[in-house]
Image (cartoon, grey):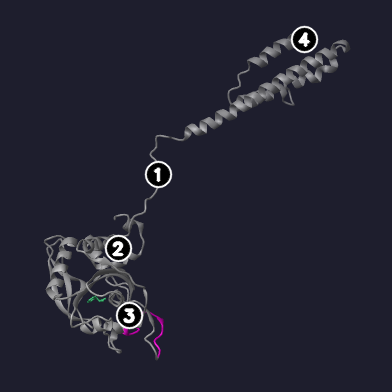
């Protein structure tokens, strides 16, 4: 009997335990409740001669320990192998997914480009608040009290006008920065003022309730309309290329006299085209200079205010202003 146990021991040692299935089959073969080889040997203990029983029991127990030791080792091995297989299932040669990289919005890019051009002409940069007193946005700029631009249709009011003042508004243009600059500085003044402005307008393909302007102001002795034309032509050539077609059209603003608007020729691919307005400009009205404490006998100046969205649309062939405000990545990723 003991010698057949010895055979069983070498058989247990020789079992090939290489995967989960073979480990489980091994467990059932030796320790299964029904017909497990060791289970059977334990149940036969009653048939063993009493004087041999003790040695028999000890020998079978040793075999059981051996089976259990092999089981523990094999289970650990199988688990490790499974983990390794999962790790190897990750294909390290696959190209990684790119993290999207943020970029400057086309409006910001255009604004930076306009700034770059005017800084190269020797202009400085000034800024003012977007929430503005009526006096800066309208009165100081020579808007008569009943001027239609003050109408609720165009202006977002933050504080309603009362008997003492015109109230507080979201600035409808960057021209109030002219006023603030002239109040604080004596000529020569040569600044641009980039910023956001607001108008209560119906949203269409060409107008939005907020947009961006870059204001320009040059005040010194003997500044003339010729200087204004020259600087705007230099700007247009820098922004749109030397062959750009532009025109000055007489216009009206309460704060400039004379006034003009500048159009840029938009060439379609089929050869047709049309003029697109990009800015208003003119010679600063002497009343405005005086309102800001500047001697209008001694000094003259020019001013202009350009629409950044219009320029971005021209430069990139964008036909609907609203795409600039929808934050659609498919659009923005093109810039
Ligand atoms: N502020 C004017 C506008 O918003 C533009 C402008 C600026 C015109 C400066 C003349 C001089 O339409």
Which corner quadrant holds the N terminus?
top right
* Dot label at residue 2: 4
Question: Looking at the image, is mark 3 or mark 1 earlier in the sequence?
Answer: 1
Mark 3, residue position? 136
The percent position of residue 177, horizontal first and vertical second, equals 30, 74
Q: Secondary structure at mark 1?
A: loop
* Residue 37 seen in render: no
Image coordinates of residue 85 in percent, x first then y, are 51, 31
Real-space Cα separation, disc 3 to disc 4, in angstroms: 111 Å
Of marks 2 and 4, which one's residue comes earlier in the chain? 4
Q: What residue sits right under mark 1 in the picture?
A: 97
Majority SS type along the magenta span: loop
Horizontal arrangement in the rendering, residue 249 relative to residue 16 (left or right): left
Closer to the camera, 122 or 266?
122
Quarter of the render that holds ligand 1: bottom left
117 horizontally vs 55: left or right: left
Looking at the image, residue 207 sits to the left or right of residue 46; the answer is left
* Whether residue 327 is visible: yes
Q: Nearer the viewer, residue 180 or 262?
A: 180
User: Of tags 3 and 4, which is closer to the observer?
Assistant: 3
Sequence-wise, which precedes: disc 4 or disc 1? 4
């Amino acid at each position: 009997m003991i010698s057949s146990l010895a055979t069983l021991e070498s058989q247990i040692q020789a079992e090939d335990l290489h995967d989960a299935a073979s480990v489980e089959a091994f467990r059932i073969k030796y320790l299964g409740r029904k017909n497990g080889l060791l289970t059977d040997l334990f149940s036969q203990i009653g048939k063993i001669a009493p004087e041999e029983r003790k040695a028999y029991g000890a020998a079978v127990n040793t075999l059981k320990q051996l089976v259990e030791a092999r089981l523990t080792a094999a289970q650990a091995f199988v688990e490790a192998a499974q983990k390794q297989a999962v790790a190897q299932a990750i294909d390290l040669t696959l190209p990684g997914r790119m993290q999207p990289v943020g970029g400057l919005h086309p409006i910001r890019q255009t604004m930076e480009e306009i700034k770059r051009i005017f800084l190269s002409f020797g202009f400085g940069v000034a800024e003012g608040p977007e929430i503005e007193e009526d006096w800066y946005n309208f009165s100081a700029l020579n808007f008569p009290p009943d001027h239609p631009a003050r109408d609720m249709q165009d202006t977002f009011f933050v504080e309603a006008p009362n008997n003492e003042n015109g109230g507080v508004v979201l600035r409808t243009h960057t021209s109030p920065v002219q006023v603030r600059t002239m109040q604080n500085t004596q000529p020569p003044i040569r600044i641009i003022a980039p910023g956001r402005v607001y108008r209560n307008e119906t949203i269409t393909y060409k107008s939005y309730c907020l947009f961006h302007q870059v204001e320009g102001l040059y005040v010194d002795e003997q500044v003339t309309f010729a200087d204004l034309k020259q600087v705007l032509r230099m700007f247009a050539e820098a922004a749109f290329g030397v062959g750009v077609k532009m025109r000055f059209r007489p216009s009206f603003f309460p704060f400039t006299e004379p006034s003009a608007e500048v159009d840029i020729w938009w060439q379609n691919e089929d050869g047709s085209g049309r003029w697109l307005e990009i800015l208003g400009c003119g010679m600063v009205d002497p009343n405005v200079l005086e309102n800001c404490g500047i001697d209008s006998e001694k000094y003259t100046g020019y001013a202009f205010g350009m629409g950044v969205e219009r320029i971005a649309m021209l430069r990139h062939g964008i036909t609907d202003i609203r795409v600039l405000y929808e934050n659609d990545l498919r659009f923005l990723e093109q810039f």
